[in-house]
Each structure stands twice: as C-alpha cells, then as structure tokens.
Image (cartoon, grey):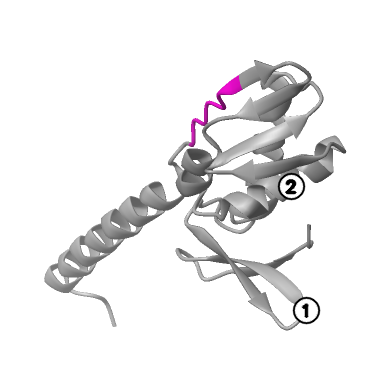
Amino acid sequence: MGIDLASRDVYERLLDMALERVSKTVARAGDRALELRPTLIQGGRNIVLTNLGQIAKTLNREPEHLARFILKETGRAGAVEDDRLNIQGRITPEEVRKLLELYIKEFVKCPICGGIDTKLVSEKRFRFVVCEVCGAKNPVRRI
C-alpha cells in the first residue's frame, strides 16, 4: 500500500504553504523589537520623565501602572502629571532604561511565545498578562 506520486506532491505543497503561513505569523509576533528612549529633564533635586505617556502607549499599558512600577522599584516618591512623571531625587537615564527592560520582561512580554502583543487583565484579586498572539495567560504581581 504505497502513496502515489501525485498525492505525495500535493501533500508536500500543502505542507509548504502551511509552514510559510505559520512562520510569517510567528515572525510578526515575537521578532518585533521595542526601542524605548526615555527623555529625562533635571530640575533641581527632581527628575522629570517627559515621555511617560508615549512609552506607556508603545507598551500598551496605562501610564499610571508604569509610573507606579518605576517609583516602587526606585523607592522614590513622585507623581504623574500630563503624561509626565516627576520623580523626587536623582536617577540616571541608564537606570530608567534598565527599569523599562525589567518592566517589559515582567509585565509586557509573553513568557511562552516572547510576543509583545499582550494586555493586563484583572480577575478578582489577581492580575494576568494575556498574550493576544498565542493566548497564554500568566499571573503577574500587583504593584
């Protein structure tokens, strides 16, 4: 009971077409890179992150959530005003970049497929990162 050559040829073409579609989807989901450039202005003893709103929009997150993360991780006081984050004390642009990388790893990137097309969802007392590409649902800590 062998497979005839014509049906094998059709089968291989169908497989090639399927693999081509799958690889395009995966490339779109996980291969995108985020390049965030925080803009800091020093004003006396305070630092102002002027493009908090733009960064939060790029990450598909609320500016207040991102601001709470930065303030909690640095242990500093601050406030959000008009898509800007006023931070009491000094902080370097390198520190802010590292904090953004940590935020992306913990609250944006899907740990299953590595995609960045995710959203934060609250259910009862818990928060989850839900991937819009692969459908994975992973718990995250509250800030």
Closer to the camera, 71 or 135?
71
Residue 127 higher or lower than 89, as above or below: below
Upstream in sequence: badge 1 or badge 2:
2
Tell me if residue 97 can be seen.
no
Secondary structure predominantly adopted by residues drawn in magenta: loop
- Let me know if residue 36 is in the magenta part: yes
The residue under label 2 is 69
Residue 37 higher or lower than 62, as above or below: above
Closer to the camera, 114 or 83?
83
| Left or right: residue 50 compared with residue 15 | right
> What element does badge 1 sit on?
loop
Q: Residue furthest left?
A: 6
In whole angstroms, how far apart are the C-alphas of marks 1 and 2? 18 Å
Query: Mark 2 Cα within 10 Å, few/some/many (few <14, many 20+)?
Result: some
Tell me which amino acid carries mark 1: Arg
Tell me which amino acid carries mark 2: Phe
Query: Mark 1 Cα within 10 Å, few/some/many (few <14, many 20+)?
Result: few
Q: Position of residue 53 (x, y in %)?
A: 51, 43
| Residue 125: image tag | 1
Q: What residue do we see at 56% from left, 50% from top?
A: 114
Q: What residue do we see at 53% from left, 43% from top?
A: 82
| Left or right: residue 122 compared with residue 20 | right
Q: Quadrant of the C terminus?
A: bottom right
The answer to which quarter of the image holds residue 141 is bottom right
Residue 20 higher or lower than 41, as above or below: below
Q: Position of residue 121 (x, y in %)?
A: 61, 71
Residue 7 higher or lower than 15, as above or below: below
Q: Position of residue 4 (x, y in %)?
A: 17, 73
Q: Which residues are magenta?
A: 34-40
